[in-house]
Amino acid sequence: MTPIEAFERARRRSAVWIGVGLLLMAAVYVRALVFTPVEAVQGLAQKIFYIHVPSAWVAFLAFGILGVTSAVYLFLKDPRVDLFAASTAEVAMVFTTAVLVTGPIWGKPIWGTWWTWDARLTLTLFLWFVVLGYLVLRTAVHEPGQRARYSAVLGILGALLVPFIHVSVYLFRTMHPMPVVLRPGKPTLPGAMLATLLFSFAVFTLFFVALLWHRYALARLADARARAEAERADA
Amino acid sequence: MGELLRAAWAIAAKDVLLEFRSRTAFVSALVFTALVLAIFNFARDPTAVSAVDLAPGILWITFTFAAMLGLNRAFGLERENRALDGLLLSPASRTAIYLGKVLANLVFVGSVEAIALPLFALFFNVPILPVLGPLVLVIALATVGFVAVGTLMSSMAVNTRLAELMLPVLLLPFLVPPVTAAVQMTARLFAGRPFSEVSAWLRLLVGYDIVFVAACILFFESTIEE
Amino acid sequence: MPDNGGFTVAAYIAAAVIYLGYAIYLVRGGRAKG
């Protein structure tokens, strides 16, 4: 099987899994909206939690993978690792955006304000900017080797930034306590809600893996085709 | 080690000399600073908001933008006439080039800050003399942090088409910890609080400097490899 | 209990648009890129 055929097969298979992921997402929706009890104090809006929190988990996971693969690239200089990192960044962007969209929609009814500089949301915002910078940088550099190196440097520096932003927000919050209207916090979840949340975590993770796999296959395909073009042009 | 420092010094001296001769970036940074200070003054209602409340934020926004102007210039010099190739062919190591650039940028940004600070004290009537020592320390530490990262970012940004736009996009998230720490510490100092109150922020800032200066030295090589 | 179901609907729809939108974009080939 030629490389292009192998990647085409990966593309088809991962597309099936994306479909599976979407169906399971629908199942999460149904379960969260219909079959999970409504929280007494926060009301229906609390259900946004079942979409928002797993999205955040995946976003941070993806960002972590981005950091690690960036470091691996600088070490190995393997272009496939670079393509994997770039794929991870794009998928990370999607999940991070979902966190930043669902967060304020949840915040408004619960905290009374669209935005609050709370730890997770603030960190997510800055990760969003770092990933955006990463993706924009990639479009702005044309030579593949240089693009890979620049991306890797940015990826590692971005990963290093995370603890510092976290500490900054934490220090800021301890010195400027926000008025607490209703804090969703981490109360112990009753069984049915916990089950829904865990189910959602599993589905989101699976969906992430399927998307990443497919995106990577696309990247390898594009790369293999470009190489084949170049060889034909030389011949 | 001595070799490294001497090479870095030579590179820094060259850049500073070049900048001193043309002075364009320096003057525009100063003009910008004065403008920002004046505009902020007219933007607020003096009866509603006291200068001291806004002052730290304004000061650091000013410093950050001035730094950005200087950083844009940093590799721009080498980009014209492909002078960077000449630099790379010289016996100076990549690290020396990086340190030299950082040093030159520090001189640039530091000079703007040195002029902006008294202007700021004047326009906003903020008592900086009693806390000058700690204030200068805070300014120095924060500046080292964002110049170190900024120099690395500009070495990448300069090779992209929209370099002046790319630099802020890449750099701004990285400015959050040092600038937040600097603003918080500056605010405490202006309020006459004891410096010990801000030790946590100080540790954050110092930690940031150590981690990012080390990381940038390590990774600079990867940004100008041919 | 507060009447905030509208927010829930908005958030769930927004998330669906983002995720479904991206999935469709990818499966249709995205833009051939590296």
Image: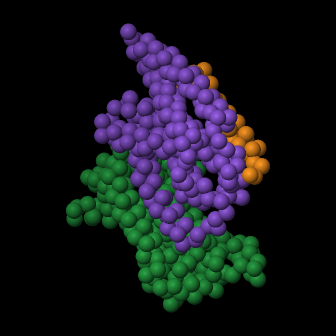
Chain colours: A purple, B green, C orange
Residue A9 coordinates in the image, percent (x, y): 46, 14
Residue at coordinates 27% horizontally, 64% vertically from top-left? B5
Residue at coordinates 75% horizontally, 48% vertically from top-left? C4
**Front one among A143 and B80:** A143
Q: Quadrant of residue B104?
A: bottom left
Residue at the bottom extreme of this rendering: B130
**Can residue A36 be seen?**
yes
The quadrant of the rendering that contains the C terminus of chain B is top left
**Front one among B10 and C4:** C4
The quadrant of the rendering that contains the N terminus of chain B is bottom left
Q: Quadrant of residue C12?
A: top right
- Count up the numbered dots: 0
Residue at coordinates 50% horizontally, 64% vertically from top-left? A170
**Can residue B16 be seen?**
no
Tell me: residue A143, above or below residue B174: above
Q: Is A105 displayed left or right of A171 in the figure?
A: right
Residue A44 coordinates in the image, percent (x, y): 70, 45
Residue at the front extreme of this rendering: A191
Tell me: residue B142, above or below residue A194: below
Tell me: residue B190, above or below residue A28: below
Residue A219 coordinates in the image, percent (x, y): 48, 26
**Front one among A168 and B97:** A168
Residue B35 coordinates in the image, percent (x, y): 67, 71
**Front one among B206 and B103:** B206
Residue at coordinates 44% horizontally, 47% vertically from top-left? A154
